[in-house]
Amino acid sequence: MPDTELKQQLEKLRLILAGAEELPRETREELEHVVADISTALEDEPPRDLVDRINSVIEDFEAHHPTLTDLLRRIVEGLANMGI
């Protein structure tokens, strides 16, 4: 996934988070932290556990938030293609 497409997916995730009022506070904070780390990874050095943390969020969301899960999977794929 090209860098531009990954940034678009990340922006889409931000928009979904902004409108997902049903998410528990802890979940929202975790996702916002992951989004911030992904943004940092695209500009600088990624945290070592970034992909593991995203995968953990994916596992937690699979049943209740399929749209977010799919989007997060695409972001992980893009990061992997970038060597992160």
Image (tube, rainbow, N blue to C red):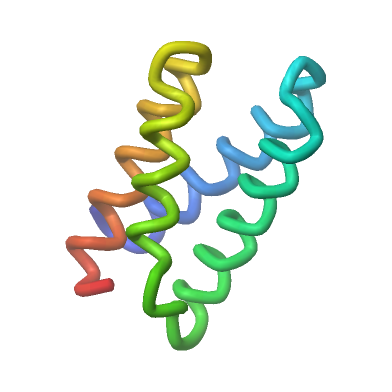
Q: Residue at x 57, y 56 (%)?
A: 34
Q: Quadrant of the C terminus?
A: bottom left
Of residues 24 and 71, the one drawn nearer to the viewer in this rendering? 24
Instruction: Identify the residue at horizontal 52%, vertical 48% (top origin).
Output: 10
Q: Is residue 81 above or below residue 48?
A: above
Report the side of 84 relative to 67 (left or right). Answer: left
Above or below, 72 against 23 in this view is below
Picture layout, residue 63 above or below residue 35: above
Displayed quadrant of residue 50: bottom left
Rendered position, 5 above or below 20: below
Q: Tally the numbered discs.
A: 0
The residue that appears at 56% across and 75% down in the rendered structure is 40
Decide which of 78, 50 is in the foreground and name it: 50
What residue lies at 39% left-to-right and 70% top-to-bottom?
49
Residue furthest out toward the bottom: 45
Residue 15 percent coordinates (x, y):
69, 34
> For residue 74, which quarter of the picture?
top left
Left or right, 27 with respect to 46, comes to: right
Q: Is residue 33 left or right of residue 82?
A: right
Q: Residue 81 occupies which quadrant of the picture?
A: bottom left
Question: In the depicted view, which residue is nearer to us: 39 or 4?
Answer: 39
Residue 66 percent location from the top left of the image? 43, 16
